[in-house]
Structures are given as structure tokens and as C-alpha cells.
């Protein structure tokens, strides 16, 4: 049991951190543009070339949200969320990997249109984003495989469904427990 909890904690921590950091890194400037020369007429670029990957950032946020949902779900829903997180992590990896050629080529072409002859290269942020995307995929795939064995929140945290005439609710809750939930729903503190 201790081994399962250690695996749970390690995979969850790795998944959350890699998804969060991948979101940050993919939203940063992923290109280094040196030797930027402005066209002879003195014009400058309006917004400049794309130097980040907003799709990778968005998909990283989806992966991060999936990790949060894994904490509070059980059963098939939990497995489905793990699969969704893995698919989104693969999307992050694919997007960042595609940026290897698209970002430098696109920036060089856009700058060439205004007469600039820049030297465009991938920044350290790009390589970090790529490495974090790989780690995120690994953690998400591990979650898909391991999630059936991970501990889940107990049903005692679920709100009661309703009472019965015998004084015991659907999940073994007593009428007193239902009264406590009703008081909380109405905004009253049942402990006061």
C-alpha cells in the first residue's frame, strides 16, 4: 500500500509540475532573433513574428486541469480523465515538436518581407518546453496505466442523495447526517 501511495504522489507531482512549467515555457519567447535589420524605408514590424506556441500553452492547461480532476474522481471517470490528459499531453508534445521548423522558418520569412536578414534560432525556453512536454506525456501515460490502483477519495465526502423512511440514507447516512448537510446547504453552521 505504501508503494502505491508513493507512486501516486510521484506521478501526480511530476505530472502537475511538468504541465505547469510546459505552459509557462511554451508561452515565452521561443526564438532568439539576432542581426535584425530594418528595411531601408525605416519601417518596422507591427506585432513581430510569432515567437511562442499558444496552442501548446492551452493544451498544457488542459493537462494541468486533468491532473486536478484525477484527485477527486474515481472509477471509469478517473480513467477517462487520465486518457484525456494523456491525449492533451501528446498534443503539447506534437505542437512543440512542430515548432522546431515552423517557428524559425516563419519568423525568418516574415522578417524578410520587411527587408530584414535576421539570424533566427531556437531559445533555451523552446528546449525546456520540449523536454517538459516529453516528461508530461510520460507522467500522463503512467497515470493511465496506474490510475486503477491509486487511492481515491472515499464516498464519505459525497453529499448524501436523500433519506429513507427507515432513518438510514442510500449510502448508510443517518437522518442526523442529512440534517447536517441540509444546514450547510442553507448556510448555517451545524457545529455552532
Image (cartoon, grey):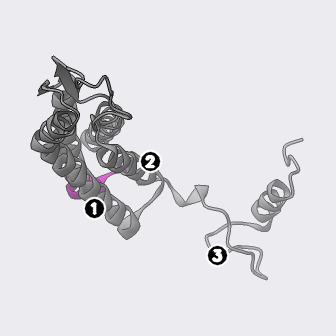
Residue located 25% across and 40% down the image? 7
- Coordinates of residue 116 in the picture (x, y in percent): 18, 27
Question: Overall secondary structure of the magenta stretch?
Answer: helix
- Coordinates of residue 105 in the picture (x, y in percent): 12, 40
Q: CA distance from mark 2 to mark 3?
A: 28 Å
Q: CA distance from mark 2 to mark 1?
A: 14 Å
Q: Which residues are magenta?
A: 144-151
Tell me: 14 left or right of 170. Answer: left
The reply to whether the magenta stretch includes residue 82 is no
Residue 43, by quadrant, is: top left
The label number, if any, that marks residue 170 in the structure image: 3
The label number, if any, that marks residue 68 in the structure image: 2
Residue at which label 1 appears: 83
N-terminal of the pair, mark 2 or mark 3, is 2
* Other residues around mark 1 within 10 Å, as few (<14) / some (14–19) / many (≥20): some
The mark tally for this picture is: 3
The label number, if any, that marks residue 101 in the structure image: none
Amino acid at each position: 500500500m505504501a508503494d502505491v501511495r508513493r507512486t501516486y504522489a510521484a506521478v501526480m507531482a511530476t505530472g502537475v509540475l511538468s504541465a505547469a512549467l510546459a505552459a509557462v515555457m511554451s508561452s515565452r519567447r521561443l526564438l532568439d532573433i539576432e542581426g535584425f535589420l530594418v528595411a531601408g524605408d525605416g519601417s518596422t514590424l507591427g506585432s513581430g513574428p510569432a515567437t511562442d506556441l499558444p496552442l501548446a500553452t492551452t493544451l498544457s492547461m488542459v493537462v494541468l486541469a486533468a491532473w486536478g480532476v484525477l484527485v477527486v474522481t474515481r472509477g471509469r471517470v478517473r480513467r477517462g480523465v487520465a486518457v484525456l490528459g494523456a491525449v492533451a499531453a501528446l498534443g503539447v508534445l506534437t505542437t512543440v515538436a512542430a515548432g522546431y521548423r515552423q517557428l524559425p522558418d516563419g519568423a525568418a520569412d516574415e522578417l524578410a518581407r520587411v527587408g530584414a536578414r535576421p539570424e533566427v534560432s531556437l531559445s533555451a525556453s523552446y528546449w525546456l518546453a520540449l523536454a517538459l512536454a516529453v516528461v508530461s506525456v510520460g507522467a500522463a501515460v503512467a497515470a493511465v496505466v496506474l490510475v486503477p490502483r491509486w487511492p481515491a477519495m472515499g464516498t464519505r465526502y459525497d453529499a448524501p442523495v436523500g433519506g429513507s423512511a427507515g432513518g438510514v440514507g442510500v449510502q448508510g447516512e443517518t437522518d442526523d447526517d442529512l440534517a447536517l448537510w441540509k444546514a450547510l446547504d442553507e448556510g448555517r453552521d451545524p457545529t455552532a
